[in-house]
Amino acid sequence: MHPFWDRIVEYVPSYIAPNILTIAGFACTLMNAFLLSYYDYYFYASSDDMRHIYKPIPPIVWLVCAINLFLAHTLDGIDGKQARRTKATGPLGELMDHGVDSWTAVLIPMYVYSFFGASDYSFGPHRMFFVFWSVFLTFYITHWEKYNTGVLYLPWSYDVSQLFLFACSLVTFFSSYKIWKATFPLLGWPYSETFELILYGKSRLVLRLVI
């Protein structure tokens, strides 16, 4: 994503502080969280077996979420470049950037559950708890490594995951949530459980690389 961000940051006026970009990106993430909390408070909006109680999320909401995801990812990518461009780098900006990311680490995984619907997770809400902690461990242990080595290494493909969620939001907007009810050919695995297994596998890989 760096070639794209290098081009985008050139259009940002030099008088805009990098922390403003950080906060603006986080505001986009918060907007998605508020929208999905309003339309899908119990994570049942995409569950067909709960249709008699909960209505599906309006398609336009997924489009807004997709745009917000893209903006949040882009702003998170250019705030550091804006700091170096304007010679405004410092520990406060780094604390702001990664402090905001620590909140995003819980808001983004929560977002995924509205794709699939809570009833797809047959073992109950503790499955969401495990997903959250897999993200927390990779995030905090990676930053602990950076604290000790001075190098922040993101081996879990942060950019790919953000672009993947952006694409999933657009697919849901154009095709509805029902597209995620299918299973992989031959394997017979639901998309929701496959996503969860990949997430756990990624977390284990990160832990082995760091520790």
Image: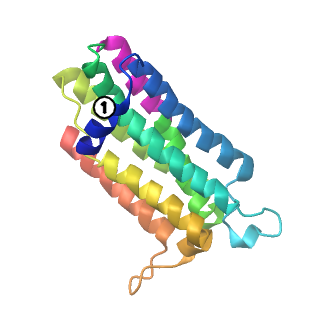
Q: Is residue 24 above or below residue 182?
A: above
- Residue 97 lies within the magenta run: yes
Residue at x-position 67% and y-position 45%: 35
Front position in the image: 37 or 148: 37
Q: Nearer the viewer, residue 179 or 145?
A: 179
Tell me where residue 197 sits by quadrant: bottom left
In this rendered view, identify the residue nearer to me: 115 or 93: 93
Hey, which quadrant is residue 54 in on the image?
Answer: bottom right
Magenta-tinted stretch: 89-103
Residue 9 image point, x, y percent = 32, 32
1 drawn magenta: no
Residue drawn at the location 32% of the way across and 57% of the way down:
201
Please state the horizontal and vertical placement of residue 137, each as a whole percent of the image: 37, 39
Three-letter amino acid code at the position of disc 1: Glu
Give the overall secondary structure of the magenta segment.
helix
Classify residue 11 by image quadrant: top left
Q: How is the image coloured?
A: rainbow
Q: Residue 185 at x, y = what percent?
A: 41, 85
- 35 left or right, relative to 208: right
* Residue at 37% over, 12% down: 92
From the image, tell me which residue sits under label 1.
Answer: 10
Decide: is 127 above or below 82.
below
Where 197 sits versus 209, above or below? below
Which residue reaches farthest bottom? 186
Vertical relation: 167 (above or below) 36: below
Q: Position of residue 86 (x, y in %)?
A: 29, 16
Residue at image position (31%, 20%) is 83
Q: Quadrant of the C terminus?
A: top left
Can residue 122 be seen from the camera position used here?
Answer: no
**Residue 102 placement, left or right of 146:** right
* In this rendering, position of residue 26 left or right of residue 81: right
Residue 74 is left or right of residue 36, and the answer is left
